[in-house]
Amino acid sequence: MPEGHTTHALAGRLNRAFAGSPVAVSSPQGRFGDGAALLDGLTLVEASAWGKHLFVEFAGERWLDVHLGLIGTFSVTGMPDGHAPVTGQVRLRLLNHRWVADLRGPTVCALLTPDKVDQIRDRLGPDPLRRDADPDLALTRISRSARPIAELLMDQAVLAGVGNVYRCEVLFRHRVDPFRPGREIRAATWQAIWDDLVALMPLGVAFGQILTMDDQVGDALVEVADGSSAVHTEAVTGARPGDRFERRFYLYKRTGEPCRVCGSRVRTQLVAGRNLFWCGRCQRRR
Ligand SMILES: [Zn+2]
């Protein structure tokens, strides 16, 4: 499911395919017909991401806001023969002579004024994938809150881009008790979580899949450093997750299975509307 790494990878793909030239914009399904007509033929200036929001700026200060939600996809694929038949419910299509991008099933697909874009950004917490992010803004909100840290990590006004998989896995990686109130979380613990997300999430962008297990993270870092990850980055279209690495996690969706560290059973409970997975024995820190 899309977390911040998905949105950032998508912004990169859209920029490589479309930025700097006019784009044909349509809504084959019809639900974004009026908005598409206002963008059709304009130059795509730049796509950017903040957390799970994708902002696409077109000439004339027209902005498109896309949020994929839980099931949305936005694929960007090459068209060697110039043909791209529409399949399924395509809310939005971007097209030039070489590329086609199809958006399906988003929670949000809307035209915005620049003011409205600023309002949305102002409401979002820092995004570990943005260079301008300030982790202290998140710490301020966490340290004043009685809500559990597992809930705060999912609150996009506290921290932008982290979804359920990164939440569960990063809390386990630092052995943090997910039910500790934010105000009891040590500043050093928060900094370690933040630094880890800053290291892990770019690997999600590079490979199109969430990597949190130390062996896979180690291999992925080597491939990013030596440049061999580029072929995998280019192969991911956004239609489905990358497959360079076996899909496995410390805890995510492993309810009842043994913890990979201590062997006690992985537990689950609904927190912030999504199933939190945790190990009651390993995760005691605050
Ligand atoms: Zn354990």
Image (tube, grey):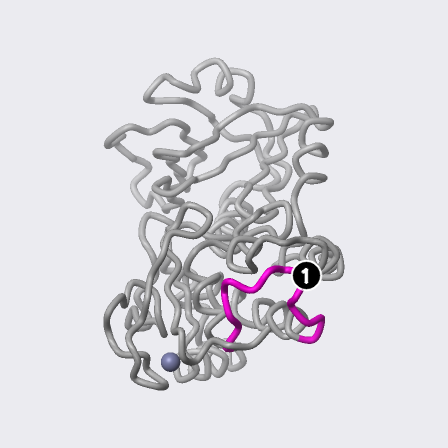
| 125 vs 254: above or below | above
Q: Amino acid at mark 1?
A: Arg
- Is 110 left or right of 273, judged from the image as shown? right
Determine whether the beta carbon of the residue marked 1 sits less than 8 angstroms from the nearest atom of ligand 1: no
Q: Bounds of the magenta span?
A: 175-188
Q: Residues within 10 Å of mark 1 (few under 14, many from 20)?
A: some
> What is the count of numbered marks?
1
Q: Position of residue 262 (x, y in %)?
A: 35, 86
Q: Position of residue 170 (x, y in %)?
A: 50, 69
- Is 118 left or right of 269, judged from the image as shown? right
Q: Give the quarter the ligand 1 occupies.
A: bottom left
| 188 vs 48: above or below | below
Q: Position of residue 138 (x, y in %)?
A: 69, 56
Is residue 181 located in the magenta-colored stretch of the structure? yes
Q: Residue at x 41, y 60 (%)?
A: 165
| Between 35 and 128, the one nearer to me in the picture | 128
Q: Residue at x 72, y 39 (%)?
A: 122
| 42 vs 150: above or below | above
Q: Read off the residue under disc 1.
A: 183
Q: Residue at x 33, y 37 (%)?
A: 82
Question: Element at badge 1?
Answer: helix
Q: Residue at x 46, y 73 (%)?
A: 172
Magenta span: chief secondary structure:
loop
Is residue 154 located in the magenta-colored stretch of the structure? no
Q: Quadrant of the C terminus?
A: bottom right
| Between 59 and 193, the one nearer to me in the picture | 193
Q: Position of residue 232 (x, y in %)?
A: 39, 66
